[in-house]
Image: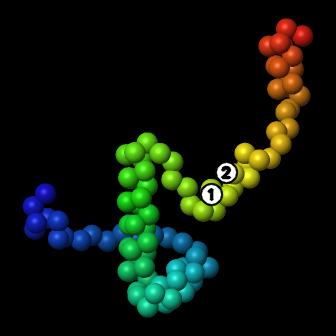
């Protein structure tokens, strides 16, 4: 890509509800930057992490996703009736 084409910018429109937009505005204010700069900074950094993760063939989880995943692994499994029947069938007990 030439340096002339790499310096061109383009717009990206995102639709969201008023509450979501307010949260973005508050977050941007905390950093003392515009909402556009905030969205650009945060989303680009996250997108780069996800692309790098995909290239490494690893799964990247946010702290909240990590906790939900861990909790799901710790929860006892409740088999459905169909799963129990299948287990009996596979063990030759049917």
Whether the residues at callouts 1 and 2 have beta carbons within 8 Å, the answer is yes
Quarter occupied by residue 81: top right
Residue at (43%, 91%) from the top-left corner?
32
* Left or right of 31 in this view: 3: left
Provide residue 23's location: percent of width, then percent of height.
Answer: 57, 81
Is disc 2 surrounded by few (<14), some (14 to 19) or many (20+) residues within 10 Å? few
Q: Nearer the viewer, residue 27 or 91?
A: 91
Asked whether residue 79 is in view, the answer is yes
Residue picked out by circle 2: 69
Provide residue 7's location: percent of width, then percent of height.
Answer: 17, 71
Quarter occupied by residue 1: bottom left
Provide residue 66's location: percent of width, then percent of height.
Answer: 62, 56
Residue picked out by circle 1: 65
Residue at (44%, 63%) from the top-left corner?
46
Looking at the rendered structure, the secondary structure element under dot 2 is: helix
- Residue 32 is tagged as none
Looking at the rendered structure, the secondary structure element under dot 1 is: helix
* Left or right of 86 in this view: 56: left
Q: What is the CA distance from the residue labelled 1 to the residue labelled 2?
A: 6 Å
Residue at (9%, 61%) from the top-left corner?
2
Provide residue 15's location: percent of width, then percent of height.
Answer: 49, 70
* Left or right of 81 in this view: 11: left
* Left or right of 56 in this view: 65: right
Q: Number of labelled discs?
A: 2
Residue 35 vertical position relative to residue 42 in the rendered view, above or below: below
Q: In which quarter of the image is the C terminus?
A: top right
Residue 46 vertical position relative to residue 42 in the rendered view, above or below: above
Is disc 1 surrounded by few (<14), some (14 to 19) or many (20+) residues within 10 Å? few
Asked whether residue 25 is in view, the answer is no
């Amino acid at each position: 890509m030439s340096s002339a084409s790499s310096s061109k910018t383009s717009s990206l429109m995102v639709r969201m509800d008023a509450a979501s937009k307010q949260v973005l505005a508050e977050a941007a204010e905390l950093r003392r930057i515009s909402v556009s700069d905030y969205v650009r900074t945060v989303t680009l950094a996250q997108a780069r992490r996800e692309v790098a993760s995909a290239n490494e063939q690893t799964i990247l989880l946010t702290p909240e996703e990590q906790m939900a995943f861990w909790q799901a692994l710790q929860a006892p499994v409740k088999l459905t009736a169909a799963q129990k029947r299948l287990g009996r069938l596979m063990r030759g007990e049917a």
